[in-house]
Image: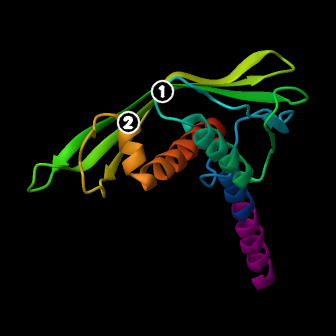
């Protein structure tokens, strides 16, 4: 009789474990940065140079390279700079960049600024000619501690980025992470 109880208990525990395991795999959760809602046929993504409609010299190069690097870092897709011979194309049009002071030091110079980037980003399945993801007016904002001693021309993005060397690097990195995460994780 003791063997029957043990067998039943073991069978029940095994069934419970299998049931919970099956329920856990179907819950839809995934580790951040690992998921992708893109169709399985998308293996190669072309990311041509973004269009720059801002006064920031070479800003499109910085952003495009960062977006390519972020996709490559995810390790799931082959990334190329061309629009031909690919499964999908990610295009970007940077329409505006602004810098606004948000706090000032004792000398009334901007000590902290908010950088805002506005862009039109679209990922298109080339073979099926359909949009997989888009944001026609993506707005990205980031606060930045000013390190420049002059504090002049803080409202002019070109002057700000020429004074604040690290600002362009930092905002480009965070902008690219936000875009790639939005595309791959569908947030």
Report whether residue 27 is seen.
no
Q: Are marks 2 and 1 in contact (CB under 8 Å)?
A: yes
Give the quarter of the figure containing the C terminus. top right
Magenta span: 1-16
Please indicate, yes or no, whether residue 49 appears anywhere in the rendered image: yes
Left or right: 15, with 136 as reference point: right
User: Which corner quadrant of the image does residue 21 belong to?
Assistant: bottom right
Q: Position of residue 180 (x, y in %)?
A: 62, 41
Give how far across and how far down residue 108 sits, in percent: 11, 49
Side of 156 relative to 181 (left or right): left
Q: Which mark is residue 149?
A: none
- Looking at the rendered structure, the secondary structure element under dot 1 is loop
Label 2, label 1: how far apart the Cα atoms are: 9 Å
Tell me where residue 48 sits by quadrant: top right
User: Is residue 33 inside the magenta stretch?
Assistant: no
Q: Position of residue 150 (x, y in %)?
A: 24, 51
User: What residue is shown at x 75% (from left), y 84% (from top)?
Assistant: 2
What x and y, as percent, mark residue 142? 38, 44
Query: Residue at the right extreme?
Result: 85
Disc 1 designates what residue? 54
Q: Nearer the viewer, residue 180 or 15?
A: 180
Which one is in front, 6 or 25?
25
User: Does 15 lie within the magenta span?
Assistant: yes
| Residue depicted at x 28% and y 35% | 155
Quadrant in the rendering for residue 9: bottom right
Q: Residue reaching furthest top? A: 129
Quarter of the figure with the N terminus: bottom right
Residue underneath mark 2: 157
**Residue placed at 25% from the left, 57% from the top?**
149
């Amino acid at each position: 009789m003791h063997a029957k109880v043990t067998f039943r208990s073991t069978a029940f525990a095994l069934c419970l474990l299998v049931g919970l395991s099956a329920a856990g795999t179907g819950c839809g959760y995934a580790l951040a940065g690992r998921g992708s809602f893109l169709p399985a046929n998308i293996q190669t993504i072309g990311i041509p140079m973004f269009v720059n409609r801002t006064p920031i010299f070479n800003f499109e190069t910085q952003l495009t390279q960062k977006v390519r690097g972020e996709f490559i870092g995810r390790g799931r897709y082959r990334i190329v700079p061309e629009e031909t011979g690919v499964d999908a194309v990610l295009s970007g049009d940077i329409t505006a960049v602004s810098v606004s002071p948000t706090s000032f030091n004792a000398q009334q110079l901007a000590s902290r600024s908010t950088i805002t980037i506005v862009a039109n980003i679209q990922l298109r399945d080339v073979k099926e000619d359909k949009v997989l993801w888009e944001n026609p007016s993506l707005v990205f904002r980031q606060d930045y501690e000013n390190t420049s001693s002059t504090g002049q021309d803080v409202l002019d993005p070109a002057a700000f980025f020429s004074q604040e060397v690290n600002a362009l690097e930092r905002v480009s990195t965070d902008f690219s992470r936000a875009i790639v995460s939005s595309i791959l994780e569908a947030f």
